[in-house]
Image (spheres, rainbow, N blue to C red):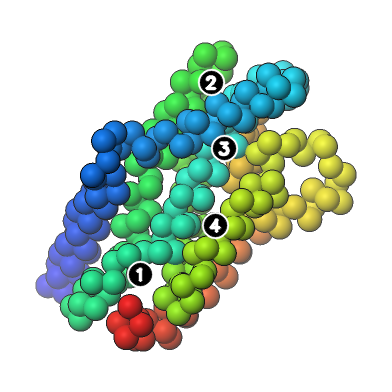
Amino acid sequence: MMNQDLKFVDKRKMTMIMNLARNDFKNKYSGSVFGVFWGFAPPIVTILVYGFVFHIGFHIRPMGNVPYLFWLVTGLVPWFFFSDSIVAVTNCFTEYSYLVKKVVFDIRMIPYVKLISSLVIHFFFLILLLYIGLLYGYIPGWYHLQLLYYTAALICLILSAGFITAVFNVFFKDISQIIMLFLQFGIWLVPIMWNTTMFSEKWIFILKFNPLFYIIQGYRDSLIYHVPVYAHTVHTVYFWCCIFILALSGRYLFRKLNVHFADLL
């Protein structure tokens, strides 16, 4: 009987999360003339601008045998998802303050709502990635399935880090602004527009401490270089250790401080 009750509760929570995520996605673009188009336009414009500047303006040559535009997009797509989601999750408790103040509502669901809302856009760009790859002759194969793993890993990174930033943002409203400022230069700390061959092994070793390095590299390994996940065993272990530490920290902070949320929002 207890197992059935738990299953019912989990199913009810999942249904609630999906409904809230659907409403969040609709409300995000409601009131604008072009609606959901604005969810796709900024990343597409960014891709076109970077592609024009680096490929046509600076005459950047292909990365090995890989066309630069395709190589660039494979790095930008996971970055778009991360940057959009981490900001959304950071602001989730302040944005949904009316739910936070409800005694009977489990506010742990709110970060998942914002993440799923952003995930819709990401799935579109994953399909676009595969299409661009086809145009350049990259036929989907078994290695492309690794995208599911790396997307799941990216989701874990966003949630584990996002719970920490979301908690702090309730107490210090400047946190979201600091994160957006960090994202402005953070894009240059991961191999999106530069190749790892441009730096010495010493610098690459240091840059790999950034968990996003693992994700960007993984997307390219899956779509371009066909390198299996187990080829980066040490880096994989390090990444999941980071996730474990971030998740524990977020859980601790949330359980310690969430009792004050309603008073501050």
| 6 or 38, nearer to the observer | 38
Residue position for label 4:
180
Residue position for label 1:
94
- Cβ–Cβ below 8 Å for labels 3 and 4? no
Residue position for label 2:
133
Tell me if I can see residue 238 in this picture: yes
Q: Earlier in the sequence, mark 1 or mark 2?
A: 1
Label 2 and label 3: CA atoms lie apart by 14 Å
Q: Earlier in the sequence, mark 2 or mark 3?
A: 3
Callout 1 crowding tier (Cα within 10 Å): few <14, some 14–19, many ≥20: many
Numbered disc 2: secondary structure? helix
Judged left or right of residue 49, residue 231 is: right
| 111 or 178, nearer to the observer | 178
Residue 144 place in picture, x, y as percent: 51, 30
Quadrant, the C terminus: bottom left
Residue 145 place in picture, x, y as percent: 48, 34
Callout 2 crowding tier (Cα within 10 Å): few <14, some 14–19, many ≥20: many
Residue position for label 3:
76
| Amino acid carrying mark 4 in the image | Met
User: On screen, 172 above or below 112?
Assistant: below
